[in-house]
Image (cartoon, helix red, strand yellow):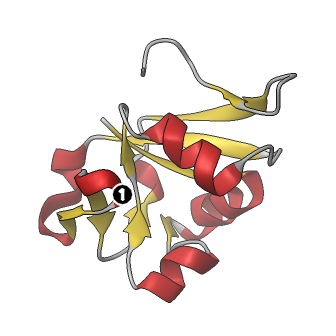
Amino acid sequence: MIYKICKETEWAEAKSRGAFAGSVVDIADGFIHLSTAKQVEETARRHFGGQPDLVLVAFDPEVLGGALKWELSRGGDLFPHLYGQLPASAALSVLPLQVGVDGTHVFPSDIT
């Protein structure tokens, strides 16, 4: 499983359009930033710290085909980057990402 963290409003727009074209950062970088289950909590901490109104969207990497590339990034890890749009219909789950009392996001226990 791979994951995209985005604003609830961004995902709502993606559903109405049929695809997620990326956040401002994704568009600037030329690809959609995704994370594995092992990487997603650190991604949230570094890039979305304390931010409310986010969703965690899960995808099967096999469905994304050749547009998905695994590239070196933070700490030498391979991160999934999508060079194209994320089809909204490919989302396996969309869960609200709550902010805990300590300011960190609370993740479902079955992904970590």
Q: Quadrant of the N terminus?
A: top left
In the image, 38: left or right of 20? Answer: left
Extreme-front residue of the structure: 75
95 or 97: nearer the viewer: 97
Residue 111 spot, x, y in % from top left: 42, 21
Q: Does residue 6 appear in the picture of this structure?
A: no
Query: In percent of the image, x 52 and y 48: which residue is there?
Result: 43
Residue at figure coordinates x 62%, y 79% from the top left: 24
The relative height of residue 102 versus residue 68 in the rendered view (above or below) is above
Provide residue 2's location: percent of width, then percent of height.
34, 42
Residue 25: x and y in percent read 57, 76
> Where residue 13 appears, x then y in whole percent?
68, 65
Q: Is residue 15 above or below residue 19?
A: above
Where is residue 38, by image quadrant?
top left
Residue in front for this viewpoint, 51 or 23:
51
Label 1 crowd bin: few (<14), some (14–19), many (20+), radius 10 Å: few
Residue placed at 64% from the left, 64% from the top?
Answer: 16
Q: How many numbered marks appear?
A: 1
Tell me if residue 92 comes above or below residue 64 in the rendering: above
Residue at the outermost right position: 101
Kindly identify which residue carries mark 1. Answer: 74
